[in-house]
């Protein structure tokens, strides 16, 4: 533990990125698990057993992959937001407010748009395995998420302009 504390003091940005990756990994597990459940429920003829979702078994419909991606995103968003505020970012900025959650959600929705467009291009148009496409897009969106949230939400608050008080004269009035 002492090693981690010292490492964090010497390399705070690197440790923040490591924490972001851990939280992102957990949110991704939630995202993919939800997608797996949706595929299993939408396509029982393709996936007679739940484990078939993970090892393949056919070509799921576009509706199943889009609903699975969207539902996974929403649950992953909540996991990611709460853990980012609690665990990842030292600077909280405006994150701990309705405004902060809204910004977080909008930035994440842009990431979802990137993800959905990528799923459409990779899976529907190029016919690449849905899991390969999802893994590649997860990495792309993770980089986008870190940079956008770090720059727009979890940044140091600008300090108010300092106004220096002038020294007071002996009669209580400022000089």
Image (spheres, rainbow, N blue to C red):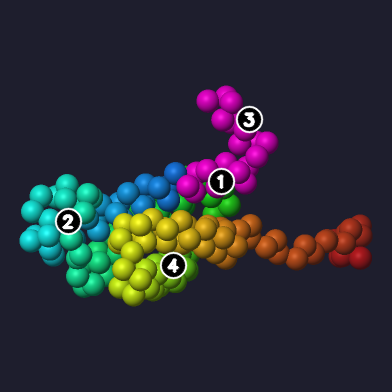
Q: Are marks 2 and 3 in contact (CB under 8 Å)?
A: no
Mark 4 Cα shell of 10 Å, populated few (<14), some (14-19), many (≥20)? many
Mark 1 Cα shell of 10 Å, populated few (<14), some (14-19), many (≥20)? some
Q: Which residues are magenta?
A: 1-21
**Disc 2 target residue:** 57
**Disc 1 target residue:** 16
In terms of secondary structure, where does tag 4 sit? Answer: helix
Which mark is first along the chain, 4 or 3? 3
Compared to 47, does 122 lie above or below?
below
Q: Is residue 72 left or right of residue 141?
A: left
Query: Mark 3 to mark 4: distance in Å?
Result: 34 Å
Q: Is residue 120 visible?
A: no
Query: Mark 2 to mark 4: distance in Å?
Result: 28 Å
Query: Mark 1 to mark 4: distance in Å?
Result: 20 Å
Q: Residue at x 57, y 41 (%)?
A: 15
**Disc 4 target residue:** 111
């Amino acid at each position: 533990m002492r090693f981690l504390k010292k490492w964090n003091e010497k390399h705070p940005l690197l440790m923040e990125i490591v924490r972001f990756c851990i939280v992102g990994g957990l949110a991704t597990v939630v995202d993919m698990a939800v997608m797996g459940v949706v595929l299993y429920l939408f396509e029982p003829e393709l996936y007679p057993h739940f484990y078939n979702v993970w090892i393949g078994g056919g070509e799921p419909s576009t509706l199943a992959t889009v609903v699975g991606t969207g539902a996974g995103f929403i649950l992953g968003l909540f996991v990611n937001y709460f853990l980012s505020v609690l665990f990842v970012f030292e600077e909280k900025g405006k994150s701990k407010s309705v405004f902060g959650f809204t910004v977080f959600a909008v930035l994440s929705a842009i990431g979802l748009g990137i993800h959905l467009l990528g799923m459409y291009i990779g899976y529907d148009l190029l016919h690449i395995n849905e899991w390969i496409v999802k893994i590649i897009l997860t990495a792309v969106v993770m980089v986008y998420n870190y940079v956008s949230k770090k720059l727009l939400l979890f940044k140091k608050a600008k300090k108010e302009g300092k106004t220096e008080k002038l020294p007071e004269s002996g009669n209580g009035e400022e000089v």
